[in-house]
Amino acid sequence: MSSATDLEQLAEIELQKDDEEYEEERSSLGNRRASAPAQSGGELDTSHPYYDVARHGILQVIGDDNYGRKLIVFSSCCMPPSHQLNHQRLLEYLKYTLDQYVEMDYTVVYFHYGLRSSNKPSLGWLRSAYAEFDRKYKKNLKALYVVHPTNFIRIVWNIFKPFISHKFGRKLTYVNYLAELKDHLRYQQLVIPPDVLRHDERLLAAQKSGPTPSVKTPPPRPPLPTQQFGVSLQYIRERNNQVIVPPVMSQSIAYLKEHGLKTEGIFRRSVRVQIIKDIQKLYNLGKPVSFQQHGDVHVPAVILKTFLRELPEPLLTFAPYQQVLDITGVESSLRVSTCKRIVESLPEHNRVVLKYLVSFLHMVSQESIANKMSPSNLACVLGVNLLWPPQGSMSLSALTPINIFTEILIEHCDAVFREPADGTLPA
């Protein structure tokens, strides 16, 4: 059996090999430097408590995965040389960011490409980091995707095996090509550094035998007449006798009103993926769905989030995206009226559905003593499912204004949606 020292030496040898391959790629690309992911939604505020670390774009929080879990991305290629980055500050920044999300289920995507001898933290740092991430961080981490793993990763994993529980180990998935992520994530929303994209292309091109591992998307099938997921509000309305609120929304909300208002952490938890897929299939086929048979209020909560997330255009539409991002520059006393103007600019159908949803969320927030879901907590979970950029990925800097806007909608629901009247809403 290899000793820990032997494994560490082997890890260093493998990392040196990675360095050589990395430099070879750099040379073939004209020796470009590693580039940080493009930011959408404005630059990072220099008043950020960890601006010195956050400005590199190493860490991104970009909405939810396919199963309603918060998605956090770590990109090694964005790490500057070690002498330019205080790794203790990096650890503090990681904890600072995760502390905002560890009370709910979350997923981590780790882009390994670009980790080199010059920018890697020491193995001692990795040990101390793992030790500092106590149970509260590990419990609600539901999946860890390691993209473009090398032998270095596998050796490091063996070094850490004595300290890692079998249960935690089951959360790890190696992803050899970016296309493999499409089965698990909303791939188009991922913040992928250009260097990682180029590396993936190089790996695919290097495959000499057989078809490339990329997932070939078949021609899209026309949606079913009964389809509810992945189609527009207008499509659903036209095929459901002009019912304004989509059935999947009215049914899930009705169940939650009756059974879930006082459930602690409602909208924070995920459920078994196959259950969600089965329910989606039933809805899309126009078959009846019984949430009662699952006996779990988190099922309709996840279904509701999934429905909103899979709309081709967000419920708030793309039009007010920049206006919402600008909310942080509006005086506090004027923010409610600003939100009201934004909501009144929406198409009538979207506005009515939004009012129906937000009225329910306001009801949930009124039970926050029991369910721990204040308007702020609800906004943190649901904001990214109401609005996202028309192009590209949502940046970390866009989350704050979106959450503020959503919190105002929920907390000041009556003021935001007061006259002009939207008509009678379903109960």
Image (tube, rainbow, N blue to C red):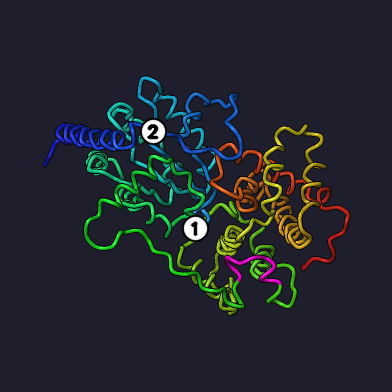
- Near mark 2 (Cα within 10 A), the count class, few <14, some 14-19 or many ≥20, is some
Task: Say which amino acid is labelled 2.
Answer: Ala
Which mark, by number, is residue 34?
2
Residue linked to disc 1: 66
Q: Of helix, strand and loop, which one carries label 2? A: loop
Residue at the spot x=86%, y=52% of the render? 418
Discs 1, 2 touching: Cβ within 8 Å? no
Q: Quadrant of residue 403?
A: top right
Task: Say which amino acid is labelled 1.
Answer: Asn
The spot of residue 6 in percent (x, y) is: 14, 34
Quadrant placement of the N terminus:
top left
Residue at the spot x=34%, y=49% of the render? 201
Q: Is residue 282 above or below residue 271?
A: below
N-terminal of the two: label 1 or label 2? 2
| In the image: residue 109, left or right of residue 27 | right
Q: Is residue 5 above or below residue 271?
A: above
Q: Of helix, strand and loop, which one carries label 1? A: loop
Residue at the spot x=74%, y=69% of the render? 244
